[in-house]
Amino acid sequence: MIHKIVKYGQPVLEREAEDITEFDTPELHQLVQDMFETMYAAKGVGLAAPQIGIGKKITVIDVSGGEGEPQQIVLVNPRIVHKEGKQTAEEGCLSFPGFREQVTRAKRATVKARDARGEEIEVHGEDLLARAFQHEIDHLNGILFISHVSVLKRDLIKRKIRKRIKAEDWF
Ligand code: NI
């Protein structure tokens, strides 16, 4: 099932999500499937549960974007255990449609998490995949990509969104 994506301004996006404690349940497997479906439909490369209104620590990532060989990664209760290097590139977020900004992040990242069955996993990413890990895990901690841009740019984005909310052209 494709879910509606929650946009900036909804409190669930700025709250720390809760750990998942029950694994390998039909509900969790269904959630994973729904999150991939929703992400591909929106042409994203990552989606965190708060973005569909669910305050739980789970994110799905596929940097292939649904084109070519799938590279599906499911991270439950993830944490970054190592970061190194730097990369700067344009970044967007499905909760901020129409906005893209240059964001500097670590070039490589290692993540420890569980999969949907509850198995412990460790994954390494570089470049776009490392960026996706950092962006999505931020989401699970209530941190949005605009907190990685200058105050000036952040205020400009917020102002534009407030205008769109007033014009009923946002939620
Ligand atoms: Ni995002």
Image: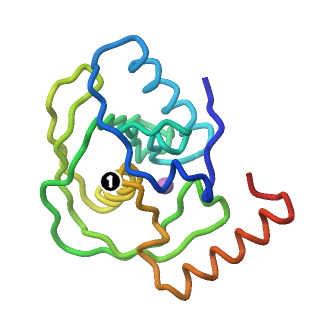
Q: Residue at x 46, y 79 (%)?
A: 149
Q: Residue at x 61, y 46 (%)?
A: 6
Circle 1 residue:
129
Front in this rendered view, residue 121 or 87: 121
Work out whether 13 lies above or below 39.
below
Quarter of the figure with the N terminus: top right
Tag count: 1
**Amino acid type for the residue under numbered disc 1:** Leu
Quarter holding residue 22 = top left
Residue 20 x/y as whole percent: 30, 30
Q: Residue at x 47, y 56 (%)?
A: 14
Q: Residue at x 41, y 42 (%)?
A: 62
| 10 Å crowding of disc 1: few (<14), some (14-19), many (20+) | many
For disc 1, does the CB lie below 8 Å from ligand 1? no
The secondary structure type at the circle numbered 1 is helix
Position of residue 90 in the picture relative to residue 113 (left or right): right
